[in-house]
Image (cartoon, rainbow, N blue to C red):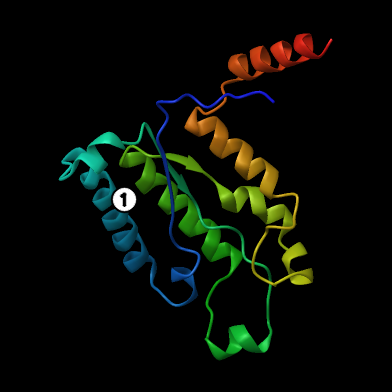
Amino acid sequence: MHTCFPSSAHVLLCTQGAHHSSDDTTSNFIAKLTSVLTSIQSCFSSPTSNFSANLTPSHLIYLTQPAEPPRQDEYVRNINDHRTNIRQQHWAELASAVALENGWSVVDQFALTQPYVWEPLNTDMAHFLATDAMDPIVDEVIDKAGLCPDDQFEKSVMMELSAST
């Protein structure tokens, strides 16, 4: 089995918005997101313990909220859910800009899940875990985290192949 995880890699993933978009305003969401991202960064920029000093992330990755399956069932009616894909896309674009301005890289889950928006209706009606959307999301996170650079992956696969022959 090949390994391609640098021992110095510290990765922090953050996502915000999937639940806020059901009943929050855009301005409140952006304010909350900005607060969350800057608060996370401040924890590492002025560590208060040896724990946080030793875990300063080398990669900060923000995942936008995913696309929204088109539900009209009793659950979404009862909670007065305001999520639509037009709204999710708008928020993903705004959130991406905020994250990039704050030094985070971005994985656009909305773009990666939107083609599969009908599939969750056959499972739990909310999550993309059993769809083909997951592999590209995981691949992009691994790439942005620098966990397995292409040249290192190719080298480890070649070593694995030569060891097996």
Q: Position of residue 1 (x, y in %)?
A: 69, 26
Query: Would you say 63 lies left or right of 69 here?
Result: left
Query: Would you say 90 lies left or right of 29 here?
Result: right
Q: Residue at x 24, y 52 (%)?
A: 39
| Structural crowding at the residue carrying mark 1, measured as other residues with C-alpha within 10 Å and reported as few (<14), some (14–19) or many (≥20) | many
- When asked about the image quadrant of residue 48, the answer is top left
Closer-to-camera residue (5/140): 5
Identify whether 59 is placed above or below 84.
Answer: above
Identify whether 147 is placed above or below 64.
Answer: above
Q: Position of residue 153 (x, y in %)?
A: 64, 20
Closer-to-camera residue (159/123): 159
Q: Residue at x 66, y 53 (%)?
A: 113
Which residue lies under the disc numbered 1? 37
Q: Position of residue 114 (x, y in %)?
A: 67, 55
The kind of secondary structure element at disc 1 is helix
Closer-to-camera residue (80/8): 8
Identify whether 144 is placed above or below 29.
Answer: above
Q: Position of residue 101 (x, y in %)?
A: 32, 40
Q: Residue at x 31, y 50 (%)?
A: 37
Q: Residue at x 23, y 37 (%)?
A: 53
Q: Residue furthest right?
A: 165
Q: Quadrant of the C terminus?
A: top right
